[in-house]
Image: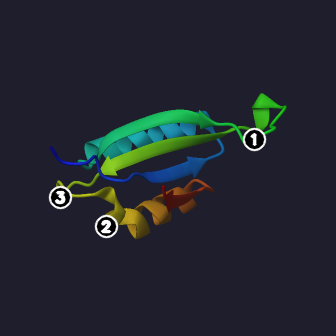
Amino acid sequence: MGREPEAVLVTLHDREDAEELAEQLLDQGYGPCTVHRDMLAGEDDAEDADWVIEVRIGPHGGSALFDEPHLALLAEDYGGFAVSG
């Protein structure tokens, strides 16, 4: 059995932006593109929470880590960032 590839975490400030970008990534062949909240440890105000798109597989069928520079550029268009995680 193979190990699940590491994810690239695309972090955006707005939920609608995260859901929109996740749909775009799915259309481009990325998957899965799971959107969830990222509350910082000790974060009291839920309004300050970021939204994370977890991307594991690139359109080429390999790890999304190979696409991290492309995903980072897309995240920057929305005022966010991408890191491997």
Q: Rate crowding at label 1 as few (under 14), some (14 to 19) or many (20 or more) other CA atoms within 10 Å.
A: few
Q: Inspect the image, locate mark 2, and give the three-letter code of the amino acid beneath it.
A: Phe
Q: Which residue is mark 2?
A: 66
Q: Earlier in the sequence, mark 2 or mark 3?
A: 3
For label 2, the SS is: helix
Task: Tell me the mark number nearer the camera, choosing from 1 and 3.
Answer: 1
Whichever of callouts 1 and 3 sits on the residue coming sooner in the sequence is 1
Q: CA distance from mark 2 to mark 1?
A: 29 Å
Q: Name the kind of residue labelled 1 in the image.
A: Ala
Q: Earlier in the sequence, mark 2 or mark 1?
A: 1
Q: Which residue is mark 1?
A: 41
Residue 81 coordinates in the image, percent (x, y): 57, 59
- Label number found at residue 65: none
Q: Nearer the viewer, mark 2 or mark 1?
A: 1
The residue identified by callout 3 is: 60
Q: Bin the neighbour count of mark 3 within 10 Å (Cα to Cα): few under 14, some 14-19, many 20 and up.
A: few
Residue 20 % position (x, y): 46, 39
Spatial separation of the CA atoms under disc 2 and disc 3: 10 Å
For the view shown, which residue lies furthest in the front direction?
1
Report the coloring of the rendering.
rainbow
Q: Residues within 10 Å of mark 2 (few under 14, many from 20)?
A: few
* Residue at 17% from the left image edge and 58% from the top image edge: 60
Q: Which of 32 and 28 lies nearest the eye of the viewer? A: 32
Q: CA distance from mark 1 to mark 3?
A: 35 Å
Q: Amino acid at mark 3?
A: His
| Of the pair 84 and 76, the residue shown nearer to us | 84
Name the residue located 53 percent from the left edge and 33 percent from the top edge: 36
Q: Quadrant of the N terminus?
A: top left
Secondary structure type for disc 1: loop
The answer to whether marks 2 and 3 mark residues whose Cβ atoms lie closer than 8 Å is: yes
43 and 28: which is toward the camera: 43
